[in-house]
Amino acid sequence: MRSWVRASGIRAGLAQRARIVLLAGEGHSNTEIAARVGVSRPTVIHWRGRYAEGGVVALEDRQRSGRPRRVDEAEVVTATLNSPPERLGVTHWSSRLLGAELGIGFATVARIWRKWNLQPWRVETFKFSTDPELEAKVRDVIGLYLHPPENAVVLCIDEKSQVQALQRTAPILPIMPGVPEKATHDYIQPQNHEHGTTTLFAALEVATGKIVDSCLPRHRHQEFLRFLKQVAKAYPRRRLHIVCDNYATNLVKCRQEIGVCSHDLPGADRVRSYATCRLSGLTLCGHASRSAPPAGVAQERSALPKVGLPSSLVGAGLPRGSA
């Protein structure tokens, strides 16, 4: 009952009855309880008697007498679970639309939806993965977040390609008292790439939110390696755990050349990168690596039960099969 008193989502009547019983348990008189709760003395006596008879369950509302409800809740629920007819021209039901369709009030429809926890206006997305090693990959990356290795930095790397520098059709009007800054909604279409495009690379440090970024003119594996060198230089003498997705440049080229070019990275032996695939916004670790893990890394990860990094997925440099 103490949780009833503290809960914000419980009905006010139940919270009030719980306060009456709790105050009675502390030894307060009926008159004092009535004054503190804001009810009459007979109300306090009534709910104390109900609690004495049936316990916590007796504090719930009893089924009221009177005419039984004439609305068939099963019909409302069934209609809600089915799509609206095409003649209505809508994709999902609203309480007013369904009420008009069934000939009942929209408040009745809303009450039934609340009772059965139906929310037809909400839509969530999902994605299936056909990767047989999905569970191991999820454990690997989640392990980096839940149990980050000591004296190491976890970075998440992503890129945004084809960032185009467009020119508006008119100059931007500056801000003035009572007038916000204004800009035209249309752009001048570039002719022969006169404004050009750029690719944004960014690395987010999970613990602090620090970002290392770079805009490079092209979107190739050479640019990706160049950015990795920049990231390694930004964290000197620190072991790095890099999580990045398997976008096409990494997948096609880097898996062939990362092992050869890893010596170009400053302190390549301290950089470990996990190739990933995307699934509902979660970064998932990639395939087994080319080389064996450093001894310190293996000891750190082996100490993590269930969530730790599988030995077949640990290695220096980028993993084999993707990048």
Image (tube, rainbow, N blue to C red):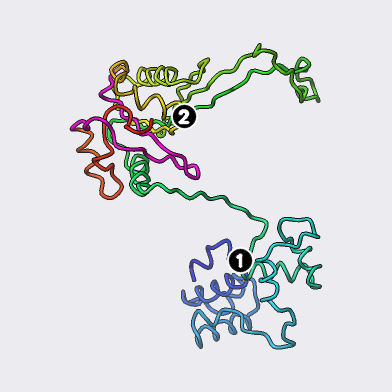
Position of residue 230 relative to residue 52, above or below, is: above
Position of residue 187 relative to residue 145, above or below, is: above
Position of residue 56 relative to residue 162, above or below, is: below
Residue 62 placement, left or right of 186: left
* Magenta span contains residue 280: yes
- The kind of residue tagged 1 is Asn
Residue 125 placement, left or right of 135: right
* Magenta span contains residue 54: no
Q: Give the labeled residue for mark 1.
A: 117
Q: Are marks 2 and 1 in contact (CB under 8 Å)?
A: no
- The kind of residue tagged 2 is Ala
Q: Residue at horizontal 40%, vertical 34%?
A: 207
Q: Give the labeled residue for mark 2.
A: 248
Disc 1 element: loop
Q: Earlier in the sequence, mark 2 or mark 1?
A: 1
Near-viewer residue (37 or 188)? 188
Residue stretch rendered in magenta on the structure = 267-295
Q: Residue at horizontal 73%, vertical 88%?
A: 66
